[in-house]
Amino acid sequence: MNIGILKGIGAFIILLLAQALVLNHIHLFNCATPLLYVYMAMLFQRNFPKWAILVSCFTMGLCVDVFSNTPGVAAGAMTLVGLLQPYLLELFLPRESTDDLAPSMLTLGTGKFSFYAIIIVLVYCLAFFALEAFAFTDWLHWLECVGGSFAITTLLVLVIEYFRCRV
């Protein structure tokens, strides 16, 4: 078995456990919840098959739904992110980069990776809370949830990526 696949499975399990056991119980100001498992969707290489990205993101979302009691919300939002990830990654990659380039602060640079992370997390938070609310009657609370979760998730993703690239 490929070492990259084992690392991916390990990251999947660690992010799932962190979300289910710790992060689901954090609700800052009753609206901001860290949704760190979206970080897994950012790490797929450039030449990774698009169908495998979709299946992996859907599986991660489904597992989070099982542990979080959010039927289909995380699976739907993660599938959307999995659909968009290869195209968003192409926007930030240098033209002369290799086919097996994995996105990180080292390969893209801090600025490009930060923008890449911001876009992915924003798309995910918008989709997640739109599916969760399924109505915009209390749109101010919806905006607070999207903004708060977006900010805390982006901060966590960038901090983890910073330390991952330093080690």
Image: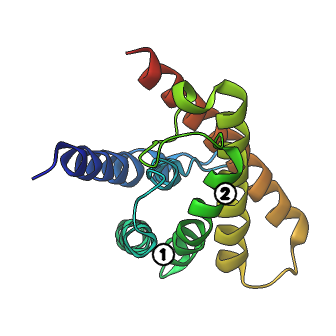
Q: Residue furthest bottom?
A: 135
Judging depth in this view, the residue of 140 and 121 nearest the camera is 121
Q: Quadrant of residue 20?
A: bottom left
Residue highlighted by disc 1: 75
Q: Residue at x 61, y 50 (%)?
A: 33
Q: Residue at x 55, y 78 (%)?
A: 76
Q: Look at the numbered disc 1 and give the secondary structure of its residue.
A: helix
Q: Residue at x 62, y 67 (%)?
A: 84
Q: Taking 132 as reference, is 36 above or below it?
A: above
Q: Look at the numbered disc 2 and give the secondary structure of its residue.
A: helix
* Res 88 label: 2
Judging depth in this view, the residue of 142 and 153 nearest the camera is 153
Query: Which percent across, then down, holds residue 91?
Result: 71, 51
Q: Quadrant of residue 52?
A: bottom left
Left or right of residue 67, residue 30 in this image: right
Which of the colour schemes (rainbow, by chain, secondary structure, one colour) is used? rainbow
Q: Taking 143 as reference, is 106 above or below it?
A: above
Q: Residue furthest top?
A: 166
Three-letter code for the amino acid on which mark 2 is drawn:
Leu
* Res 7 label: none
Quarter of the image containing the C terminus? Answer: top left
3D distance between C-alphas at marks 1 and 2 = 19 Å
Judging depth in this view, the residue of 128 and 141 nearest the camera is 128
Three-letter code for the amino acid on which mark 1 is drawn:
Ala
Q: Is residue 131 visible?
A: yes
Q: Is residue 31 visible?
A: no
Q: Residue at x 53, y 22 (%)?
A: 162
Left or right of residue 140, residue 69 in this image: left
Q: Residue furthest left?
A: 1
Query: Which percent across, then down, holds residue 75?
Result: 48, 75
Q: Earlier in the sequence, mark 1 or mark 2?
A: 1
Query: Which percent across, then down, holds residue 58?
Result: 43, 74
